Every structure is written in C-alpha cells, then in structure tokens.
Amino acid sequence: MKLTNMKLSKTKQKETVSPAPSKQEYPWGLTLNLEDAALTKLGIKELPEVGVECKLHGTGKVTRVSQSASERDKKETRSVEIQITKLALEHKEGDREAMQKGFAEADSY
C-alpha cells in the first residue's frame, strides 16, 4: 500500500481551523492519542522518546459519512469518520534502540 504524506502546504497551515489555537502541520483529526488502556493492550511498557518514528498498521470501520453543499460558500464538503478497530505498531529498523524503550515489534494484527 502506498503511503501518502498528509502534511499541509504552508498556505493551508495558515488557513486551517482547529480546536487548538496553534499552527498545525497536519490536518486536524489525524493525531492518534493512545492512552494507558490502549498502550497496555499494545504491549507498550515504557514511553518512547518524542520524535521517534513508528509504523502503524491498522483496520478501521467507517462509522459515519457526510456530504453537504452550501449556497453561501458555493462549495461541497465531504467527510468520512473511521473508527480504528485493530492496531499494531512497529519500529523502523534504524530506530530499534529508541523504540525498544516502549514499542514491541508487531508482526501481525
């Protein structure tokens, strides 16, 4: 499967509206927050260092779709909400030491 870089262009970073008042590099909603229960299920005992890259493998279920048009904006908007139902994390080969602090290598999901 081809990975797509979701980083916003410099122009879009300025235009983006999100709940946080800071400039966002990526669209709102693409952050995945794993709390204690999820970390435990994934076998993560210690937290990795900030900035360490990891691979995500997952399965999701579409839970909501929406399409609307506005006379005022003359623009159609679309969205899809996906609930992640299965998740695995694995480290990059070059980050093995950093990832061993917390992420267990995931072979399958």
Image (cartoon, grey):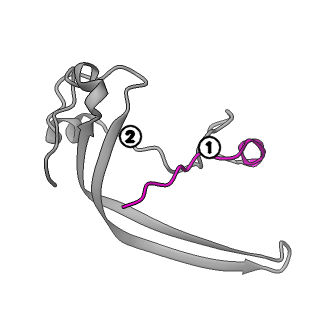
* Badge nearest the viewer, 1 or 2: 2
Query: Main SS type for the magenta part?
Result: loop
Q: Residue furthest right?
A: 72
Where is residue 55? Give x, y as percent: 32, 42
Does the CB distance between marks 1 and 2 fall below 8 Å?
A: no
Which kind of residue does numbered mark 1 sit on?
Pro
Measure the C-alpha gap from mark 1 to mark 2.
Answer: 15 Å
Where is residue 89? Give x, y as percent: 25, 42
Between residues 54 and 38, which one lies in front from this camera angle?
54
Where does label 1 land, which residue? 19
Determine whether 65 is above or below 94 in the image.
below
In which quadrant will I find the N terminus? Answer: bottom left
Which kind of residue does numbered mark 2 sit on?
Asn
Report which quarter residue 83 is drawn in. bottom left
Pointer 1: residues within 10 angstroms few (<14), some, or many (20+)? few
**At x 83% / y 80%, what residue is drawn?**
71
User: Helix, strand, or loop for circle 2?
Assistant: loop
Q: Is residue 13 magenta?
A: yes
User: Helix, strand, or loop for circle 1?
Assistant: loop
**At x 41% / y 22%, what residue is drawn?**
50
In which quadrant will I find the C terminus? Answer: bottom left
Name the side, left or right, on which 80 lies relative to 36: right
Where does label 2 land, which residue? 33
Where is residue 95? Give x, y as percent: 30, 25
Q: How many marks?
A: 2
Determine whether 59 is above or below 101 in the image.
below
Pointer 2: residues within 10 angstroms few (<14), some, or many (20+)? few
- The span picked out in magenta is 1-15
Where is residue 2? Give x, y as percent: 42, 59
Q: Is residue 38 magenta?
A: no
